[in-house]
Amino acid sequence: MISDACGPIAQTRLGQVNKLGMCRDCSLTSPPMVGSFGTPNAAQLFNRARSARNGRDEGRKKLGEEKPGNGMRSYSTRVLVWIIVYLLFILGPIFALMLGQWPPARDFWTEFSAALGYAGLAMMGLQFGLTARFPHITKPWGDDLIYHVHRQLSIIAVGLVIAHPLILFVVQPEFLALLNTFKAPWRARFAALSIYSLLAIVVMAVWRTKLKLSYETWHISHMLLAVVAVGAGVMHMVGWGYYLASPWKRELWIGMSVCWIGLLFYIRVIKPMFLIRRPYRVAAVREERGDTHTLVMQPEGHPGFRFVPGQFGWLTVWESPFKANGHPFVFSSSAAVSDGRVEMSIRSLGDFTSTIHTIPVGKRVYLDGPYGTFTVGNTAALHVLVAGGVGIAPMMSIIRTFADRGDQRPIILLYGSKDWESVTFREELEVLKPRLNLTIVHVLTDPPDGWTGEKGFITAEVFKRHLPPSYADHEYFICGNDMMMDATEKILDELNVPISRYRSEPPSFV
Amino acid sequence: MRRIYANKLIFAIGTTVILMSVLFALCRVNGGGIGRLTDKHAWAPHRQYAYKAAQKSVAVDRAPNENGHRTTFGLGPNE
């Protein structure tokens, strides 16, 4: 899924952005030519930040935010625990094969290839858990990175699984006869089916755009092939029976596989059953600047859900939630509203997003959420929001929530757009400004005549001009296309801002 | 940066899984189980031969050797 600018958040699906993956409204890279836009200087902001720090705990309580983290150490600990648990799930069942009765001895390479096969299958199975949208699983990484981790670990898992037969073919060439599908025993046929399914998953995921597969077709194929790959892999193991001769070992691996596939069943069948009982009605479709529409949705017959500003939901509009056609968009509305109403601001870029303005008022839609860790939750007194194009959507949720809750912690919004006319929420930001300790810095790539503000892209110089110098003390939120986020994260690294101090949402994460 | 950081951790996970697969194969290469991990005889290089011999003979060869000694774990009849 690719969005036209920002986030699970902001937009669309893979293949709906230009070849460079750039949002037309996002700005970055080359240095700006001119200074500020009537904003306070860095020293004034520093004083504001210091005075606001005293009241930060109170503000945090008001927002219902999580307890302050302990910076990098806390982040590293969470990631470390995540990795240890993940490895236990992979390696535990493998080393369990060496308990109890052992099968006869074999040479090193045969045993190594068997271990790789088991490890690969265990990793493949755990992919179902990674994408099951469990908050505890996604929290250390963020939803965008979880999908990145999912892709990378899947490639490793496929490599391990394919290495298994390749090693066997080298050390025991007689196994090559098993490639003859017509004469091979069933256990070998299951192995071939598993590997062919895995290869198909990789090909379809990597070259989906070139193959001109729609997102929906790809998504359904991806899930079915994954089930076939894992199911056939387990059938191969059970059929071979070498390590799974003991009933408890067989039950362990079959049980694990059932659990893995059960997670998919939970997401695709159980969860939609709940969603269908908690529908939403479209209350309004508002046109915004920058080819963007805001979808206002009201819960129907239920109180809705509470979300934290910056989180997103999976939106299903035209079909039943049982069809795997949900699209992730960030909530752009205030989290402080009490009637359950939520809004999503969506830029028109692809086949789905370009239909948003045609959604009739009163249309029943389904929302699965909230998800995401792109949320305010740090001790930082100063929040720096870096938005490109429709990446302003999650920032609007944060700003509106601050305004509704009377939170006076200072915010600096670095907002990159293509031109002045396409600056989404331009007028509303000016209206909200007096109610908040908010500084807005517009950066335009194509500024109008007489523009005295920042021009070009959001660069390190823009940061230095508008932010107090204690850069590592602030909390940063970045939303834009991949290039913009990479550039911004690089800037923050140069400014010695630790990873735990910033959160970013990419335009695409599935 | 987050992605680079994640890639390093993914590399660490992949490497660990492969190394553990090697360990699995080393434990199993002579038909052993997880107990070999804590068996010092199994890992002392100069005793590998003795270990293998003992593994093969211990089940069937508990008879006294030519010196009148019974075989012990790690010390086969030829040692």
Image: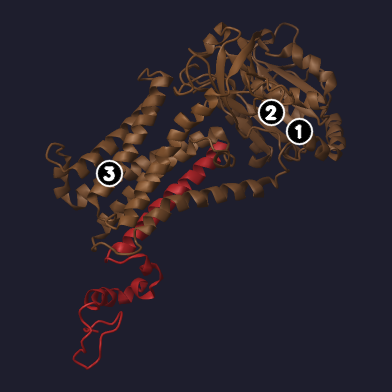
Q: Residue at x 55, y 6 (%)?
A: A358
| A371 vs A408, nearest the viewer | A371
Residue A63 numbered mark, or none: 1
Tell me if A204 is positioned left or right of B60 in this view: right
Q: Which residue is mark 2?
A: A309
Residue A168 numbered mark, or none: none
Q: Amino acid at mark 3?
A: Met
Q: Amino acid at mark 1?
A: Leu
Q: Residues within 10 Å of mark 1 (few under 14, many from 20)?
A: many
User: Subunit of mark 2?
Assistant: A
**In the picture, which chain is red?**
B
Q: Residue at x 34, y 58 (%)?
A: A97
Q: CA distance from mark 1 to mark 3?
A: 51 Å
Question: Are dots 2 and 1 in contact, CB under 8 Å?
Answer: yes
Q: Earlier in the sequence, mark 1 or mark 3?
A: 1
Residue A235 numbered mark, or none: 3
For residue B48, which quarter of the picture? bottom left
